[in-house]
Amino acid sequence: MTASDRDRTDPGRAEKSHESAVSAIPDGGTVNSPFEVVSEYEETRRDRLRKLYDTYVYAPISIIKRDWRAQIGFTIVLFYVFMGTIGVYLIESTYVTEGPALAQPFETWEYPLGTDDMGRDLFASVVHSTSEMLKMILAGGLFTVTLGTVVGGIAGYKGGVVDTVLSSITDVFINLPGLPTVMVLALMLPIHGNPYLIGVLLTIASWGGLARAIRSQVLTLRQEPFTEAARSMGVPSHQIVFRDIVPHLMPFVIINLTNAARRVIFSAAGLYFLGVLPFSNHNWGVTLDLAYSGGAHYRTGALHWFLVPMVAIVGISIGLILLGQSLDRVFNPRVRARHEKKFAESQLEEVDPDSDDDSEPMIGAA
């Protein structure tokens, strides 16, 4: 006898079978058993690619297009990146007696920013100095953010002995005097003017503050329900920290990345100006030192010699500040969710422009 025959012969059994296959939902309606319900729609590979495009391309670009700070910041930073990567191949490096001494800016297109007292082209000097400065910024910023995030995240999540050891190391670096430490290490270590090593050296004591702040944030986030759920499912600790917790801290991390980059710029320019760091080519700090030694800060005819590297330093700093403020919005979950929702609605309209918004989705049983 089949199940349908037994239900016909026993009405009570049929009614119980129907009741077991139907479950109540909070709004008072009924649906089939959740173990029997499947969606009418199936996520295809195209849908997954569209979601990835929405998350990592459309939403960031939409936020940037609506933020004037992002547009200005990206323009300035991209200009310096272009100048430090492609510009060095388009503009030949300068040399002594290339032009007349202390030629004024915009007098001739051959020397648009003028020359110094030795006839060196200041525009070519700025272009070729940008390349080394970008390398220092990249190395110093990534070193600070990576080490600070890793140490702070692990210390805050693991706790116990791990937290004690990592926090003690962090406290040592926090209390190191930054400038004297850099000066001593620059004289002791064989860095030989390597911009990547100099960038790391300039931020050797800067990651401790970020690690301490990240640890404090992780101590709060590790008690959140999503962290508890991942832990109960046996997800490894490193995946919970770097896949679930750290993304929530990205706005804070990005702000610290731009701050670390600006710190590298000012520290490098200052130490080159003082003659502490070794160098093989002219850069912004060395140009400032030579201009100061030549009295450019009080000589009217040589003032441009002092102002050109100073404007270059201030310009990239402003660009990084605006870029950091705009990226804070890009990584803000609420702002991203709003743009992702708009993208999803637009895609739904493209798929079915004549669909009725008041229609209810169909639920089918497997």
Image (cartoon, rainbow, N blue to C red):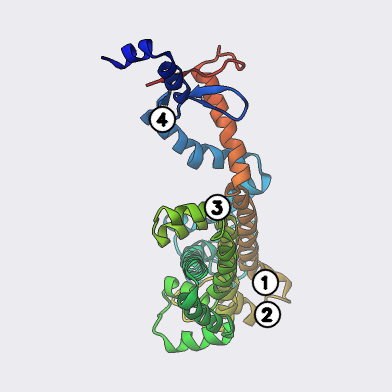
Which dot, 3 or 1, sits closer to the camera? 3
Q: Which of 71 and 57 is in front in this view?
A: 57
Could you tell which of marks 4 and 1 lies nearer the N-terminus?
Answer: 4
Could you tell which of marks 2 and 1 lies nearer the N-terminus?
Answer: 2
In three-dimensional space, the C-alpha distance between marks 4 and 1, rounded to whole angstroms, equals 82 Å
Q: Disc 2 residue type? A: Gly
Which of the 4 image quarters holds residue 29? top right
Residue 143: horizontal and vertical position, in percent?
Answer: 47, 69
Give the quadrant of the C terminus: top left
Left or right: residue 229 versus residue 359 is: left
Q: Which of 255 and 337 is in front in this view?
A: 337
Q: How crowded is mark 2: few (under 14 residues within 10 Å), some or many (20 or more)?
A: some
In three-dimensional space, the C-alpha distance between marks 3 and 1, rounded to whole angstroms, equals 64 Å
Give the structural element (helix, strand or loop) at label 4: loop
Residue corresponding to mark 1: 302
Which dot, 4 or 2, sits closer to the camera? 4
In three-dimensional space, the C-alpha distance between marks 3 and 4, rounded to whole angstroms, equals 25 Å
Could you tell which of marks 3 and 1 lies nearer the N-terminus?
Answer: 3
Residue 120, above or below 359: below
Residue corresponding to mark 3: 225
Q: Disc 1 residue type? A: Ala
Q: Disc 4 residue type? A: Phe
The answer to whether the residue labelled 2 contacts the one labelled 1, judged by CB atoms less than 8 Å apart, is yes
Which dot, 4 or 1, sits closer to the camera? 4
Residue 322: horizontal and vertical position, in percent?
Answer: 65, 54
Residue 303: horizontal and vertical position, in percent?
Answer: 69, 70
Q: Which residue is drawn at 39% across and 84% down?
A: 190
Q: Disc 3 residue type? A: Pro
Q: Which residue is drawn at 36% across and 30% down?
A: 45
Residue corresponding to mark 4: 35
